[in-house]
Image (cartoon, rainbow, N blue to C red):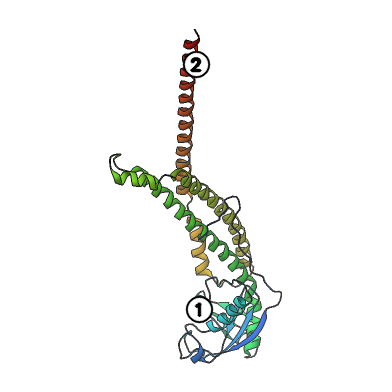
Amino acid sequence: MWKPADLQRPPTYEISPQFDEPFSFIVRVPAKNQPYGVGDLPETCHVRWDGCSLLVGWVQSVEEPSIARAGLIARDVILEALKAAGLEPTSQPPNLTHQTLRITAESSGSDIEFQGTGHIKVSVPVPWDVERLADLVFGRISFIQTMYYDLANERSLEQVITFSMQDDLDNLLRIQYERADLGSWRSAESWKRRWRLRHWRAQSRQLIARIWLAVSHIRAINVSFSDLLDSYHKWLTEGEPSLFSQDQEEMERDVKNLDLAFAERRAEELGSRLDNRALVGITLAAAIVAVLVGAVATAWIAHHI
């Protein structure tokens, strides 16, 4: 959960490094040693990874259906290596567990061509060689894939902040409800509640400040997301393969439907109430001081006449 300790300092997040040339290697793990059950899991995986995008290829018959959890062992190897290096890797969905990312490559036709929006089929103009196919397909999809994951990362960060903001708003409204339900002054339970809520003003001000900070960051992320999305659509219209159409549409719809108005109105309304209470308190204090000063002055004058 996004919980910045210092409200003056915005949250930070790391951008994954991307190498100019992808790492190319082979992962060989017997099916019985893979933590995903035995069966038809491929034991030899051909991997291409540039720090941001990952492609895992294996050989299977074109008549066979997509193998659930195939290739995940290659992802696990990379994650384990990164963790051993002291890094904190993130596997951003959609990933290998999504059927929408399954690509079947066949050496047919004269040009590389992607077809379909679910199970994607690609025809490649090369002899049947897994290493060459992996290089060719990765080279063709890595750019648009990286752009999509940049979008997905922005959306993920927005979701984390939004969830935290909603949690803060819930806590703020809960405080107001508990104050409205203190009960009779004569009740012992009422005094217990009052004692438990003795710091409600400070807590409310902190929650309101956090909500406004979250709103500010969400709006900034949305601007960045919009810019990235424009570039993403531009490259799609210029012939880059559309690999994530379903996920992309859902992501765009979620961002478009995000409504911050309720949180902003509640924060503004409750903040105004707190400010008015403070103003009333200051006014009353000033009036009391004025009365006391007037009483003292009257008594002094009466004493000296």
- Return the residue nearer the eye: 241 or 277: 277
| Mark 1 residue type | His
The mark found on residue 297 in the picture is 2
| Mark 2 residue type | Ala
Label 2, residues with CA under 10 Å away: few <14, some 14-19, many ≥20: few
Q: Which residue is mark 1?
A: 119
Picture coordinates of residue 192, whole percent (x, y) = 34, 47
- Return the residue nearer the eye: 3 or 104: 3
Residue 5, image quadrant: bottom right
Picture coordinates of residue 165, whole percent (x, y) = 48, 54
Which residue: 54% across, 84% down? 73
Which residue: 48% across, 32% down? 279
Circle 1 — which element? loop
Which residue: 58% across, 79% down? 80
- Return the residue nearer the eye: 199 or 269: 199
Residue 7 visible in the displayed image: yes
Q: Is residue 135 left or right of residue 182?
A: right
Picture coordinates of residue 115, whole percent (x, y) = 55, 77
Tell me whether circle 1 and circle 2 mark residues in contact (CB < 8 Å).
no
